[in-house]
Amino acid sequence: MSEEKKMKFEDALLKLETIVKEMEDGNNLSLDDMLERFEKGRKLEQYCITELNSIRTKIEKVTQSGALEPLTVNDSDTEIR
């Protein structure tokens, strides 16, 4: 799971989508390969869910606090007040 923790949410989601597509297509995957992808997909799914829950919690805190601290958008110096 440490590999997923290092990646961004968007990268994990893209990797999960790729795994799902590979499994849907089949591409003559062996049962072992399908199981390996399934396990990896479940780990990625759990990582994405955890990240989304974390983001939801942050959003709830900001909306409840009235956004007392400036929020930085992306990596720019633009602040939202």
Image (tube, rainbow, N blue to C red):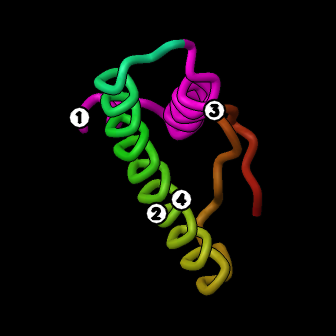
Kind of residue indicated by mark 3: Asp
Q: Which of marks 1 and 4 is nearer the N terminus?
A: 1
Q: How far apart are marks 3 and 4 (CA)?
A: 20 Å
x then y, percent, for residue 17: 61, 33
Where on the picture, by quarter, is residue 30? top left
Choose mark 3 or mark 1, whichever is in front. Answer: 1
Mark 2, residue position: 54
Relative to the observer, which residue lies in front, 48 or 54?
48
The C terminus lies in quadrant: bottom right
Q: Do the residues bearing badges 1 and 4 touch, measured as CB atoms within 8 Å?
A: no
Residue 34 on image: x %, y %: 39, 28
Q: Name the residue under label 3.
A: 75
- Please, what secondary structure does the residue beneath circle 2 have? helix
Residue furthest toward the bottom?
64
- Tag shown at residue 52: 4
Question: What numbered label is drawn on residue 42?
Answer: none
Q: Residue at x 34, y 26 (%)?
A: 31
Q: Is mark 3 on a helix, strand or loop?
A: loop
Provide residue 40's location: percent of width, then percent of height: 35, 34
Q: Disc 1 and disc 4: Cα gap in Å?
A: 18 Å
Residue 14 on the magenta span: yes
Residue at 39% in and 46% down: 42
Q: Do labels 2 and 4 touch, CB within 8 Å?
A: yes
How far, Cα to Cα, is label 2 from label 4?
5 Å
Disc on the earlier residue, 3 or 2:
2
32 versus 76 height, above or below: above
* Span of residues in magenta: 1-27
